[in-house]
Image (cartoon, rainbow, N blue to C red):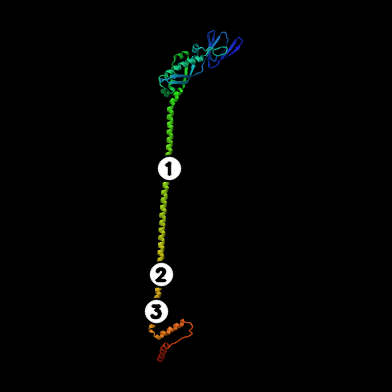
Amino acid sequence: MAEIKTYPLIRHFRAEPTAHVLRYRRGQLVAEGPGLAFWFSPVSAQAAAIPRDDQDLPFLFHARSSDFQELTVQGVITHRFADPGLVARRVDFTLDLTRGGWTDTPLDQVAGLIAQIAQQYVIDELVRLDLRAILAGGVAPIRDRISDGLRAETSLDEIGIEIVAVRVASVAPSADVEKALQHPTREAIQQRSDEATFARRAQAVDKERAIAENELANRIELATREEALVTQDGANDRRRAEEQAAARAITARAADDEARMIARREADGLRAIEDVRLAVDRDRAQIQAGLGTQVLMALAVRDLAGQVGKIEHLTLTPDLITPLLGRLAAGGQDG
């Protein structure tokens, strides 16, 4: 709290800036203020130091709810000494002028007083509610109850203590009760997790089914298109065959027509030749009909001579020579 240096017959006192020092000589207050430094005689001097900075008081209170469940409330109360002179009159902050520390434990006394008052407010708050209501409300109602109660506490004002802040970190039941309370929630969370897993699996099954149906639909569509393609190919082949057959029929008819035309032309030519031959034969027959037997015989012999090459032997019978000689004789007489 303070630094004290010892010299022969005299000492020097120097306090920290955060300490409000009250200097006494023979029981009378002669000076006060933060961070005082002075020379003093240990025979007649006295001093007290009150901290001016904020003091944190951690607390851990045990209380019982209306349904007889043990609860633990944990937090911190921050306070400060607003009136150091009043605090020095109510609490012993006297310094040991040899070591520079307090002769007693004033901060523990103040902390115990504040803790006892705060604990009473916590007990009064929790005893009105059951466990589930307390846990559902959280730390805010308890924090407000402690803060409002301490700020309204006259005993602290009389000492010169000001409450700066109250913070409650947790309100927790016993371990067994907390585990029992957590079990339904854990079961509900696990159930929701299972439901989410089942829903995810169902969704995966639906997606797989949709994929399978899509693949089946694609296969059906491909089969339908393949069937249509086969049908179209068959129709095309059939049409192509029909076109080719029609073309061949047209070609065959054209060839038949041409053949008939050629045959007709050849027949007409042969007919014309035969007609000429018949006409020649007819004329020849008419000419030969006008000739006598002897002429015809002579012509026949001539033709025969023209067709036969070399004749080694020729036999002339009287039946053949007699008519010819008679004919020749008749012709000579006429001449």
Name the residue that disc number 2 marks.
263
Q: Which mark is residue 114?
A: none
Q: Position of residue 118 (x, y in %)?
A: 45, 17
Name the residue that disc number 1 marks.
212
Taking the spot 41% from the left edge, 69% from the top edge, the residue there is 263
Taking the spot 42% from the left edge, 52% from the top edge, the residue there is 230
Drawn side of residue 334 relative to residue 29, left or right: left
Name the residue that disc number 3 marks.
281
Taking the spot 43% from the left edge, 39% from the top edge, the residue there is 205
Q: Are marks 3 and 1 in contact (CB under 8 Å)?
A: no
Q: Position of residue 164 (x, y in %)?
A: 47, 19
- The residue carrying pointer 3 sits among few (fewer than 14), some (14 to 19) or many (20 or more) residues within 10 Å by Cα, namely some
Residue 248 lies in what quarter of the image?
A: bottom left
**Disc 1 element:** helix
- The residue carrying pointer 2 sits among few (fewer than 14), some (14 to 19) or many (20 or more) residues within 10 Å by Cα, namely few
Q: Position of residue 222 (x, y in %)?
A: 42, 48
Sequence order check: which comes first, mark 2 or mark 3?
Answer: 2
**Disc 2 element:** helix
Sequence order check: which comes first, mark 2 or mark 1?
Answer: 1
Q: Check the image and report above or below for 247 versus 132.
A: below
Q: Are marks 2 and 3 in contact (CB under 8 Å)?
A: no
- What residue type is disc 2 on? Ala
- What residue type is disc 3 on? Asp
- What residue type is disc 1 on? Ala
Q: Give the mark toward the camera: 3 or 1.
A: 1
Q: Is residue 230 visible?
A: yes
**Disc 3 element:** helix
Sequence order check: which comes first, mark 3 or mark 1?
Answer: 1
Taking the spot 50% from the left edge, 15% from the top edge, the residue there is 108
Between 222 and 140, the one lying in front of the other is 222
Between 165 and 130, the one lying in front of the other is 130
State the CA–CA distance, disc 2 to disc 3. Answer: 26 Å
